[in-house]
Amino acid sequence: GESVGLHLPTLSVQEGDNSIINCAYSNSASDYFIWYKQESGKGPQFIIDIRSNMDKRQGQRVTVLLNKTVKHLSLQIAATQPGDSAVYFCAEKGDFGNEKLTFGTGTRLTIIP
Amino acid sequence: EAGVTQFPSHSVIEKGQTVTLRCDPISGHDNLYWYRRVMGKEIKFLLHFVKESKQDESGMPNNRFLAERTGGTYSTLKVQPAELEDSGVYFCASSQDRRSAAGYTFGSGTRLTVV
């Protein structure tokens, strides 16, 4: 069935370093992907999205890369800060009329001071 | 602008009891979604309202779960009777633009523990 999964459940990064969180998806028809950040006691918070007609999209300190050939998605966070510590989820969103988000299991990112 | 509000934030109930979760979406958001995360697994879709109508309820696990959105404003999710496997965090989200996830706003969730 369709699934969106993550390669690593935990990741620890030294403050100031860059981090990369990876995600694999199985539905080759997927055309819209999103990264969410979830801090303790809060709901998922939108970080950045990308559509399948793009390979890369940049935000503030974050970059999402999409490789449709191998169905792989990654989130790069530059110059990590303590506030980046959270669980990160990739998700796929369906088309109009089938708009549910399909989430991966999440990666816990810990920034080491 | 107030965000998506969920109540209660935590609930502990005994197996067989009934629990009702409430979600107040952002004012003016026609779309309201329920999701849940069980036992640290992935967050899974439950259902989607457009105003007061159920657009997609394919994720509802069984008939012990009943969601309503009378008047197209707040929504309730009732679990009756609750089972142990219903424990988890229940999230509500709302949006106005169905095409973009950027406008999706999640609430902080209700942590449900069934003992």
Image (cartoon, coloured by chain):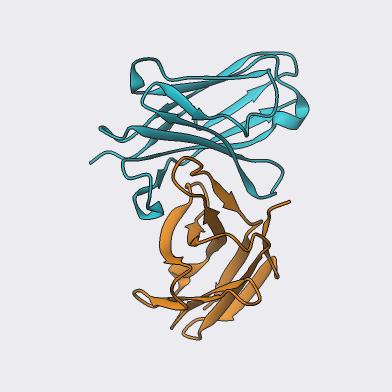
Chain colours: A orange, B cyan
Quarter where residue B36 is shown:
top right
Q: Is residue A17 left or right of residue B71?
A: right
Q: Is residue A101 left or right of residue B44?
A: left
x, y percent for residue A63:
44, 77
Residue closer to the observer: B63 or B80: B63
| Image quarter of the C terminus of chain B | top right
Quarter where residue B46 is shown:
top right
Quarter where residue B28 is shown:
top left
x, y percent for residue B20:
54, 18
Q: Is residue A103 left or right of residue B32?
A: right
x, y percent for residue A103:
60, 53
Residue drawn at point x = 64 percent, y = 14 percent? B18
Q: Is residue B82 above or below residue B35?
A: above
| Image quarter of the N terminus of chain B | top left
Residue closer to the observer: B18 or B101: B101
View extreme (front): residue: A29
